[in-house]
Image (cartoon, helix red, strand yellow):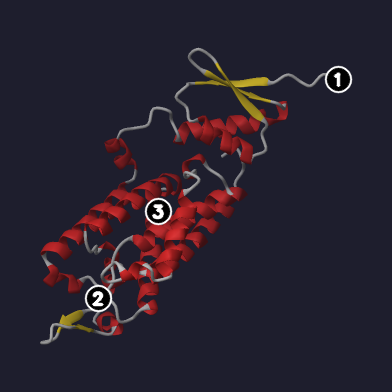
Amino acid sequence: MSDPEPWIAVAELPLAVDIETLSQHLAERGVAHRFDDRADSRVLLVARRDDIPTVLMVLREYGRFMDASAPGLAAQARQVPVVVAMLLLGLIGALLVSFLPDAIHWFTFQDFGVTEADKLRLEVADTAFARGEYWRLLTPAFLHFGLFHIVFNSLWIWEFGRRVERLAGHANFLLIFLAIAVGSNVGQYLWHPNDLFGGLSGVVYGLLGYIWVRNKLAPHPLLALAPGIFPLMIIWLLVCLAGVLDLFLQGGIANGAHVTGLVIGTLFGGLAGFSARARPATE
């Protein structure tokens, strides 16, 4: 009986490298590996010589997108101009709602007025579109009603959006964002045509769906979310759909936007994932 082949050292890495993420992507490709710690470095070893080209490819991707010396906030912002623009427009929408409420009827999906009895009178959406006000398909995404609303959405847009923009590119990410934002607004209007709504949460769920499906089909270090994020967001979605939060939050939850955004995002993630799998592994 022959002795097993010795482990093969492939690369020496800094101790600061996140080996959990790196190990996850090697395991997803079926690479048997281990790490040996040295005084000031960490050595990556593999069990099979045939796996070395795969390891080198993963290390190139890892080094490009997950550098151990993470850039500062300003540098990260320069990498994702579309995400930054989304966040700024969301902030402007929140300020508009808080300080210029009489102007928000120009940016809601349906135009509206207030009756003498202080009740909202909603106009049928087709009427505004017949006047050429097509910006209403998009602008409700930037309206936010309260501090919790804008902070919650902004944190998730930053967490998910910067990953997708860096991977997909600025133009592709802009297209993905527009499709999800418009689609989720239309979905919410069809879900509850007699309610005013706003916010980026439909886009949040769209980006979540994109990341989940894209990373399942073609794993990439940049899309490696913490393991509990996806289940947490889906549980939150189900709680909202059950109507529990409607008892505590004035105005309710835009469930139609969440569900529609999630569906559109998964479709885009599927297209991107299959496209990535079709490309040569050396890209």
Reply above or below: 1 against 235: above
Q: Residue furthest top?
A: 39
Which residue is rendered at x = 11% and y = 66% of the image?
100
Residue 267's disc is none
Rendering quarter of residue 23: top right
Q: Residue furthest right?
A: 1
Label 1 neighbour load within 10 Å: few <14, some 14-19, many 20+: few
Residue 275 on image: x %, y %? 57, 53
Q: Mark 3 touching mark 1, by CB under 8 A?
A: no
Q: Label 3 vs label 2: CA separation? A: 24 Å
Indicate left or right for 193 with 261 as reference.
Answer: left
Quarter assignment of residue 111:
bottom left
- Could you tell me which secondary element the residue under label 3 belongs to? helix
Residue 155 seen in render = yes
Residue underneath mark 1:
2
User: Which marked residue is nearer to the observer: mark 3 or mark 1?
Assistant: 1
**SS class of the residue under badge 1?**
loop
Q: How many marks?
A: 3
The answer to whether residue 261 is visible is: no
**Distance CA(mark 2)–CA(mark 1):** 77 Å
Q: Amino acid at mark 3?
A: Phe
- Circle 3 sits on which residue? 173
Q: Mark 2 vs mark 1: which is more N-terminal? A: 1
**Dot 1 amino acid type:** Ser
Write the residue at 52% across / 30% down: 19
